[in-house]
Amino acid sequence: MLLRKIVLSLIPLMAIFMVRAQSSLAPKYSNDFLSIGVDARALGMSNSVVAGVNDVTSGYWNPAGLVQMETMLDFGIMHAEYFAGIAKYDYIGAAYKIDEKSAVGITGIRFGVDNIPNTTQLIDADGNVNYDNITTFTAADYGFLLTYSRELSIPRLYLGGNVKIIYRQVGDFAHSWGFGLDAGIQYHLKKNWKFGAILRDATSTFNAWVFKLDDVTKNVWIQTGNELPENGLELTLPRLILGAQGDFQFGKGFYGLFEMDFDFTFDGRRNVLIRTSPISIDPHLGVELGWKEYVALRAGFGNFQFERQFDGSEKLSFQPNIGIGIGFKGIRLDYAFTDIGNQSVALYSHIFSLKFRIKGKRDKQKGKDEAPKNE
């Protein structure tokens, strides 16, 4: 009955999303740095973790999973780079289990390019080229997610939400502040099936941009044929992600799982597997095989796109990912070989992430031969 009410409550929201999709304030890829993903485990599984995630990275993937942490404290970090280190992408997260029914967490994400040359003052007032006038600046995006998660009175039903604070900066030229909300839900069946959903930017996320350009910079932009930017709002439309996971155990401590997720966007036709207007659907699949908490092998398939050929026809392509994880006594190191930027032309990178857990007095002791939860 509760699930039926939740579904019905989403119907009027969907109508609002479709209307907002026509807004000129809503570019398709606004705040897209928050869609890259975190954690080498998830990246190795093509981001297919919404239904089963249950550790510190739940703060990013699905806040409902945070309360399912197995220890009192969870921490996670990740570093990745684009284009031989030109751009850097960093993640850090921490989570605390208040009691058996609730948990809180904080997530920080930075995507930035440092030491960009500023040549707007290269030519001085006398018309001479002066290389001493070249300075550098940083263009960076920051996202901070504050998470609360709770298990409801209905067994195996979990809810969670994020408050998002976004700061984007382009040197001294421009900056913006943004605010938004995420809402997530997970439900576990008794027989090894899990279902999850997250509505990102549930109320739409607003970024207020402020531009600060001196007269010299304005003249340079005008003379080079650029339009002067104006202060204003940028809108990030909601995105709905649905997922289902099945897991099984075999042998002594061995386990396997697979998850299928579907990303729904409401901003018009996108180049994904199911493309309509205004709704597009992007599916992705991940699998994992492991032994206890010690080792896990992973693979994923996603980023389905139609590539136009020279003869005008289209060919469907997809992006495979692989990964491995090793763990011991609450410390876990994960690796993924993946295209961190999710580009149509794959630029694969080696991604590492680290997670570690600290037990509290109320944490239940596990048997030595118990297969781990799907971390």
Image (cartoon, grey):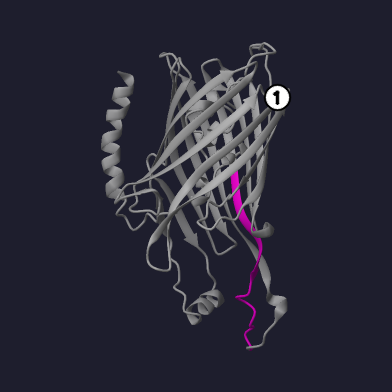
Residue at image coords 40%, 50%:
272
Q: Is residue 279 above or below residue 94?
A: below
Which residue is disc 1 drawn over?
A: 330
Residue 303: percent from left, percent from top: 48, 48
What SS does tag 1 mark? loop
Looking at the image, can residue 46 be seen? no
Residue 56: percent from left, percent from top: 59, 30
Please tell me how crowded label 1 is: few (under 14), some (14-19), or many (20+) other residues with Cα within 10 Å. Answer: few
In this rendered view, identify the residue nearer to me: 241 or 29. 241
The three-letter amino acid code for the residue at tag 1 is Gly
Q: Is residue 185 above or below residue 347?
A: above
In the image, is residue 117 part of the stretch drawn in magenta? yes
In this rendered view, identify the residue nearer to me: 349 or 33. 349
Name the image quarter holding residue 283: top left
Q: Is residue 16 above or below residue 208?
A: above
Residue at image coords 45%, 14%:
190
Q: Which residues are magenta?
A: 109-126
Name the image quarter holding residue 94: top right
Q: Is residue 139 above or below residue 71?
A: below
What quarter of the picture does the C terminus occupy?
A: top right
Residue at image coords 37%, 66%:
312
Left or right for 360, reference 106: right
Residue at image coords 44%, 73%:
227
Residue 171: percent from left, percent from top: 60, 62
